[in-house]
Amino acid sequence: MTKGKQLFSAADIDGAVGKIASGIGDEFKGDFRECALVGIHQQGVPLAERICRALEKKFGSAPVLGKLDISMYRDDIGNRMRLPPIRETEIPFDVNGSSIILVDDVLSTGRTIRAALDALTDYGRAGLIRLAVLVDRGNPEFPIRADYVGFTAHPPEKMKVVVRFEEDGEPGIYAVEWKNQNL
Amino acid sequence: MNYILKNARIIDPGRGIDAVGDIGIENGLVADPGKVKKPTVMDLAGKVLTPGFIDLHVHLRQPGNTMAETIASGTAAAAAGGFTSVVAMPNTSPAADTAGAIEYLRQTAARTGVVRVLPCGCMTKGYAGQEMAGIGSLKTAGVVALSDDGKCIQDHALMRHVVEYAKSFELPILDHCEDNCLAAGGVMHEGKWSVLLGMNGMNGAAEELMISRNIILARQIGWSIHMQHVSVKESVDLLRKARAEGIAVTGEATPHHLSLTDENIKKYDTNYKMNPPLRSEEDRQALIRGVADGTITAIATDHAPHTATAKLVEFDHAPFGIIGLETALGVTYTVLVDSGIMQLPEYVKRLTTGPAEILRMKGYDLSEGKAADITVFDPEAEYVIDPAKFKSKSRNTPFGGRKVKCRPLLTFVGGKLVYSFEG
Amino acid sequence: MEWTRKDLLSLYDLNAEEIECILDTAAEFKKVSQRRVKKVPALRGKTVVNFFVEPSTRTRVSFELAEQRLSADVVNMQAQSSSLLKGETLLDTVKNIEALQVDLVVMRHSATGAQAFIASKLKCGVINAGDGAHSHPTQALLDIFTMREKKGTVKGLKVTILGDILHSRVARSNMWGLLKLGAHVTLAGPSTLVPREFESVPGVRVCHNLEEAVEGADVVNLLRIQHERQTAGFFPGIGEYARFFGINSDNMKLMKPDVLIMHPGPINRDVELSGEVADCSNSVILEQVTNGLAIRMAVLFLVAGCVKK
């Protein structure tokens, strides 16, 4: 897989995670007892873990961590050549009345978030739902906005924004041509 | 029309001839090539010329199932396969178990048939295996043999009486050897593949049992019995042993049993479904050895046409049978001769004098004055079998797309050129 | 890995990765049935026809529920109520169904190979709910899923399948699936119902003695013994079968202490297994039913999920 053009470095990512964590901490005034961070597969999951660690470091406590796979809620089932494999969904808390922060690496069309909202609704009636993203491309196809944003970036539409963490090798945020991707 | 066929390799087993030479045809008979008047001359250098092939086992489906085949289309298919005579199986609808039915067959064949149709009568009424048919009347009406093909007389006492009675009319018996109990409900060979696929199997012992029954009766009564479509290794062994002991039993093998096995069933293609079913590789090899060493003296197609609609159903429910007249030469030549297992003259016997002897036809050869039933083929021609070009009305063959060697070129029946390969 | 098949006909066709993919997907769908809202919109707007030429209640209900929990529109057809009875060929019937723009056909038929025949002629996907004695992939998948869930892995497990193997599509599908995942398979039962030809498959042992078959087993999967076999002369009767091949607390002692007792259902108490065994803690028979729903949701999701080439 080609690396693509680097937009931001690993150090930039760390900084952005800290910025998002501060934003969350300020809103909830350091009290995360009714709070949950739910990472959306794939890269929303390691991102949520990092935000959690940052909150732990800054405030001494952190929200409950969950993960969500939205494959069953996609709006393009039957129209894709391949379906990506379903990954693990874990919602280890009661959604009813909770404050949930959805976490994803890149906000692009907004459809993933739409699906995630539908999924969460099937678990219960949340108190409020916020959205944290590392990169906001700023051109959603749905009226979805992010509440906590790491960076904005506007690469050309034919480029995909890819986030790599340390465990993926060559960490950073890259713009890669669509045809070089598996999906 | 008269002909001089020049420079062919003439293989005439009846006279023990295998040499390059010329053959003349005048007024429908074999003639001295030097004396034929107003001949059409054909140069057949590199080609092989033999007495016309005889197929002991053909279903012409008329009367009763003319959507699948008629005497006209079936005999056209025979001619295209190099056959000059076919024995018409009597399991038509109505069955050929009366003189009237035989007369209908003879008249329709005379009017529309392209090659000689040799009528075969039922052994029992309606080939139901219960009451003997009017065998004497059938002989008078012109049958050359008796068969209940499709079914097998299960009552041994009745079979004994049929054989004894047929003996007195000198009629050959062609038996479809199958014990109903061991084969009942089966759709394929009982073996490794039927077990893995979960299909009902037809145990090979069903054939062995009836072949043993027939060998015993042939020995006791002193009349020959011919085993149709032998398919199992043990059947070949039984035949070999019985013939060595001088018992008058003969056997035939089909091109599909010589070339295909039961593993093909995993495709669920009903063009591989017939009775007896395709057997294991071990059985196929034993059958090839049997044909090569003369235990089995005839190749017969069991040409069984079915409409596409009839065959386009679940494997369990599909009728048994595949066509074979137009693929017999290519398939069997490739498996038996091109592979080096048999020599050409010996192979030719299986299609000519072998079947002729089973029908008690004496002197089946190309000596002067004999009927000019002649087959000419090209043993070097390699081609891919294309069912779209068949003369048969039906297309139920597993051999579509198969590459084979040896092509029928010319077929003469009574001196008339009834088939000539174009292309 | 990604699912790319138009149909699911037999585990014989799948490789280990594809089977694991179905099991992993089913694990997620199992959670859906444990939530408050037991439904996901994955197959919304898609039409699934349950075409059962051979009657069935349990499998059909399981498929129907799975389809509804995926938000699909469901149509049930039985042979008696279809035009098959009027003489329409199977192919024409199914083509007529396809002409209604259905997305998926779930089919059961008593003739082996019927689904394979149909699948090759239809543009929409076909899921085999059982064909003749040949294949019942979703049953085997739910059996294997249960084993994997309870034991952690299928690889190296000693699995004994006991009963009328000859006529069982459940046995055959289990056999192929288990072998692909590296289990050891023993096929056991009366000698008339368990042919030695099965040993031509590498990794399979055939056993006609119960004690030998279950000794040290991790899993014992019991097949329902059908009354018709008795009249067909295969074995003397239910009493003799129960005596020589029925599982009870005595012969359970030969198995591993944490052995799984499985059965595709419906069970014949005191024939394949004693009432005690059916109710003991080793029995996972009811969990199989729950897992069946998850497996069928997974299979429907995967087969419906990708564009058919």
Image (cartoon, coloured by chain):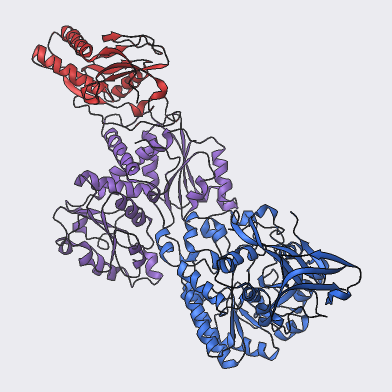
Chain colours: A red, B blue, C purple
Q: What residue is drawn where x is 30% and y is 29%?
A: C37
Q: Give the camera-side residue of C256 and C88.
A: C256
Viewport quadrant of the C terminus of chain B: bottom right
Name the residue: 38% across, 56% down: C169
Residue A20: quadrant of the picture: top left
Residue C264 is at least partly visible in this image: no
Report the number of numbered marks. 0
Q: Note whether B263 is above or below A65 in the view shown.
A: below
Res B117 → quadrant: bottom right
Q: Position of residue C95 (x, y in %)?
A: 57, 43
Closest to the observer: B129 or B401?
B401
Residue B210 in sight in this render: yes
Q: Is residue C64 above or below residue B334?
A: above
Looking at the picture, how far across and down is residue C247, in whole percent? 22, 62
> Residue extending furthest right?
B38
Q: Residue furthest left?
A: A60
Residue appearing at x 26%, y 31% in the figure = A88
Q: Is residue A106 left or right of residue B277?
A: left
Residue C80's x, y, as percent? 51, 51
Residue A67 appears left or right of B305 = left
The quadrant in which the N terminus of chain B is found is: bottom right
Q: Nearer the viewer, residue C70 or A138?
A: A138
Instruction: Estimate the x, y position of residue B222 in percent, counting from the top left.
Output: 60, 92
